[in-house]
């Protein structure tokens, strides 16, 4: 019996020496491993610039490797799904766009639920859309918004307007314009801005609703002409281009946006730290100036404000999608 007691005491003593080390490892603060920032679009676009800016600054402040992974496809759904189904350990982040607010209304058979499977951390950026016209066709070189709508009403379905994708915010903006104006505009969906802009410049399609960030350089180069802007105020770079709002269409205040998300279930302290980092990084004057040159408005804030904004967008676009019977093509 004494021998047994001695053996048990020795085992307990050995276990006691292991427990503090195990507890120390378990309590080691985040982050411990490489962080992956998923950008659900191809390299080179605005989302990619946002993701790489975030990754570069996070690597410095968190003192761990932070890499960008571009997982493009289905207008952002592929990368968004990847993060929604990832382990909620703070090591997989999403720089996601408007598809997060549109997905459940447009794609009822998704493998994930954007509301339940993603936690919004902070908005990062927003930009309005420009209604732009080709300069290759003299009929559109001086046309204003009233001219566009009048022509569409005179000959319903004859005025074509390109979007950068069926089911995109560009498509939603066009449907909102049709609802607000009563004009029957013909939707011409493209698979992204890259193939649409050359056709617009060449006159194959006369009009387009495009992100201000991608349209602005072409307007400034004189290749296309801006007619109206969906933001709440005129673009500083285009002070002569009116907003839809000031032309009597308040429902046409529309923004494309990008924000940071983590998988649902990510510990609150991690999400809070990430929110603080986003606000620090994207409130830096040099970063603000860099994005302003591109026509982008940095808009970081609280997680609560971002969640409230997302719910508003879901309600707004969900109602439009149902009312107009919109389905991705």
Image (cartoon, grey):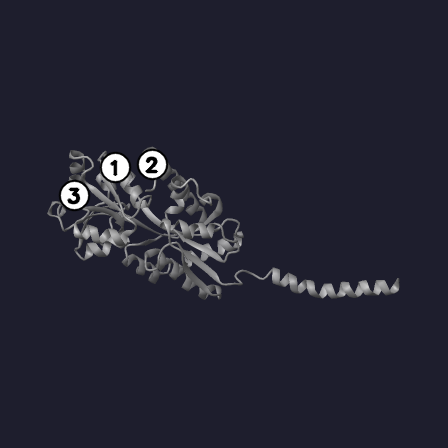
Are the two marked residues, 3 and 2, in contact with CB atoms closer than 8 angstroms?
A: no
Residue 140 percent coordinates (x, y): 14, 46
- In the rendered structure, find residue 42 and report the number of the disc placed on it: none
Position in image of residue 54 (x %, y %): 40, 60
Element class at badge 2: helix
Q: Is residue 26 left or right of residue 14?
A: left
For marks 3 and 1 on the same chain, the one whose residue lies earlier in the sequence: 3
Along the viewing direction, whichever of 37 and 250 lies nearer the viewer: 37
Q: Relative to residue 135, is residue 279 drawn left or right? A: right
Q: Residues within 10 Å of mark 1 (few under 14, many from 20)?
A: some
The quarter of the image holding the C terminus is top left
| First in sequence: mark 1 vs mark 2 | 1
Of all residues shown, which one is farthest toward the left?
138
Q: Secondary structure at mark 1?
A: helix
The residue beneath circle 3 is 144
Q: CA distance from mark 3 to mark 2?
A: 26 Å
Does the rendering let one see residue 8? yes
Q: Helix, strand or loop at disc 3?
A: loop
Q: Residue at x 24, y 46 (%)?
A: 162
Q: Which residue is mark 1?
A: 178
**Whether label 1 touches label 2, CB < 8 Å:** no
Q: Nearer the viewer, residue 187 or 227?
A: 187
Using a 10 Å C-alpha cutoff, classify the residue at mark 3 as few (fewer than 14 neighbours), some (14 to 19) or many (20 or more): some
Q: Is residue 325 above or below residue 241?
A: above
Q: Quadrant of the N terminus?
A: bottom right
Residue position for label 2: 320
Eyeballing the image, is 195 above or below 155?
below
């Amino acid at each position: 019996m004494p021998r047994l007691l001695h053996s048990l005491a020795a085992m307990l003593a050995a276990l006691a020496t292991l427990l503090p080390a195990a507890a120390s490892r378990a309590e080691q603060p985040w982050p411990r491993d490489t962080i992956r920032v998923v950008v659900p679009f191809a390299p080179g676009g605005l989302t990619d610039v946002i993701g790489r800016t975030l990754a570069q600054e996070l690597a410095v402040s968190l003192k761990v490797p932070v890499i960008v992974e571009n997982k493009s496809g289905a207008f952002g759904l592929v990368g968004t799904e990847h993060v929604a189904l990832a382990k909620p350990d703070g090591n997989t982040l999403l720089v996601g766009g408007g598809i997060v607010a549109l997905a459940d209304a447009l794609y009822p058979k998704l493998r994930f639920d954007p509301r339940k499977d993603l936690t919004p951390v902070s908005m990062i950026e927003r930009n309005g859309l420009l209604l732009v016209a080709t300069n290759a066709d003299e009929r559109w070189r001086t046309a204003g918004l009233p001219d566009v709508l009048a022509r569409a009403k005179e000959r319903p379905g004859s005025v074509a307007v390109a979007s950068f994708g069926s089911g995109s915010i560009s498509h939603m903006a066009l449907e909102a314009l049709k609802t607000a104006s009563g004009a029957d505009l013909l939707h011409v969906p493209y698979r992204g801005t890259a193939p649409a802009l050359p056709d617009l410049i060449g006159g194959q399609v006369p009009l387009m609703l495009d992100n201000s960030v991608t349209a602005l350089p072409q307007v400034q180069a004189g290749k296309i002409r801006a007619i109206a802007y969906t933001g709440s105020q005129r673009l500083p770079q285009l002070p002569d281009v009116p907003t839809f709002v000031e032309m009597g269409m308040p429902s046409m205040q529309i923004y494309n946006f990008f924000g940071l998300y983590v998988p649902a279930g990510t510990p609150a302290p991690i999400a809070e730290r990430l929110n603080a980092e986003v606000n620090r990084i994207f409130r830096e004057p040099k970063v603000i100036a860099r994005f302003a040159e591109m026509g982008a408005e940095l808009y970081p804030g609280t997680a609560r404000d971002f969640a409230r904004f997302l719910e508003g967008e879901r309600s707004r676009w969900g109602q439009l999608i149902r009312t107009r019977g919109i389905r991705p093509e």
